[in-house]
Amino acid sequence: MLQTLPALSNPFQSQMGIPLGAMEFTRPPQLSALRSDTLWLKFGREYLRKAPFICASQRHREDLIIKKQKAHPQNVDLPPILPKKKKKPFPVPIEKMRQAARKDKKIAEMGIEKPLQPPKNGLLVPHLIPVAYEVLDAWKDLIKGLAQLVHVIPVFGCSECSEVHVAHAGHNIQDCNGGTCGSRRGFHSWVKGSINDILVPIESYHMYDPFGRRVKHETRFDYDRIPAVVELCLQAGVDIQDYPSRRRTNPIRMIGRKVIDRGGFVEEPKPWRSRGSSSFLDFDTDGACGRFPPPSLADVPRIAQETVDAYEMVRTGVTKLMKKYTVKACGYCPEVHVGPCGHNVKLCGAFKHQWRDGKHGWQDAIVDEVLPFNYVWHAQEPKGPPLRSALKRFYGKAPAVVEVCMQAGAQIPERYKPMMRLDIVVPESEEEGLVA
């Protein structure tokens, strides 16, 4: 008869999920008691030694570390730069777009009218009208603040590429991709920058009726070009005298892709074509540095903090508006159009534009295409020696607006600190070879 050893009291579990404390080791009767006890105890110890045990407290500690890293990321890398010889990825998966198209087609074949909710039916969204006014006011404060800070904080831009640097001298990082970069061995050709180098101007055609006639190539000069952020606010309910917009009282009706009732075409007012009007100057970055005088040194930190707060408010408000109002972007070039469908202007000169006869490849836009971050190298010592290519991996980056405001004395928003690598100590030239 087989004899059994006492159950081993072990809180862990075996590989098969059986508690080891509940296992019993048996021994054959022909072995002596002492020998069998020795053999089976050695077997049990060897099994316990080889089994991969994970303590419950250890697993809980690892989960806490992972959650802490996600809540407070450190040294986050920037998003990869998309290649110019490839189309941008769709923000919405193509399978979801195909499913929605098949659903709309099925409803249209049945002759059922497509259900549309504001603003897809041409009506305004009431709770987003105050958001649009807040975005427009913050946009004016952002332009005013940057125009004043540029007089105090030096900004440099490369004359051959789109690189921008915020410091008392341009950096020496050899990453220029301009036309004559080969003769300069990749070094940048620095010139004095302006507000347009910090806040990239993304413009769009102003549409009196976004659901009306599309902008054609022959009629492109009949429409004004204004900042895309301003055009988004206009379509969301903001009223500006120089740029009127049609406000519908009856919704648009559609069956599939066909509009069966749009309320008729209304004669659009002629564009003002006057960028010198007082109402437009507040929204435009062109010539903003000449409109605002240099601030006093005592007011620079306050202006910098107000500017970075306005920048965050603009990004937050644009994100809320773009969840409802449609904005289209070209999948090949930086062109943006605010409206349910893109325009027909043939000015795309990006990858394979000959195959499209210069037309844009429209797709849904993201916030970064309407309000680009425009990342620049973060200079821990703006008045120190220029940044070098050999130490490039130790440097961080930040949006140009945040970098300017930080050097002027503003508090850095928490979400930008990981990418700026503030906790990394840049080694000296003689320590460079000793760093792993």
Image (cartoon, grey):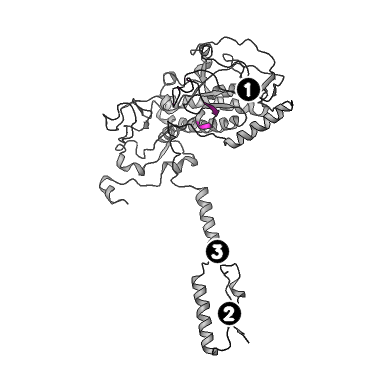
126 in relation to 344, above or below = below
Dominant SS in magenta: loop
Q: CA distance from mark 3 to mark 2?
A: 28 Å
Within the magenta stretch, is there residue 367? Answer: yes
On the image, the x and y values in percent for residue 294 come to 40, 24
Residue that carries the numbered disc 3 in the rendered image = 57
Is residue 115 in sight in this rendering? no
Q: Amino acid at mark 2?
A: Phe
Is residue 70 in sight in this rendering? yes
Tell me the SS state at disc 1. Answer: loop
Whether residue 287 sits left or right of residue 234 in the image: it is: left
Question: Which region shows up in magenta?
Answer: 346-368
Q: CA distance from mark 1 to mark 3?
A: 56 Å
Residue that carries the numbered disc 1 in the rendered image = 237
On the image, the x and y values in percent for residue 196 come to 43, 24
Whether residue 106 sits left or right of residue 143 in the image: it is: right
The disc placed on residue 25 is 2
On the image, the x and y values in percent for residue 142 come to 49, 27
Q: Amino acid at mark 3?
A: Ser
Q: Are marks 1 and 3 in contact (CB under 8 Å)?
A: no
The disc placed on residue 131 is none
- Please tell me how crowded label 2 is: few (under 14), some (14-19), or many (20+) other residues with Cα within 10 Å: some
Tell me the SS state at disc 2. Answer: loop
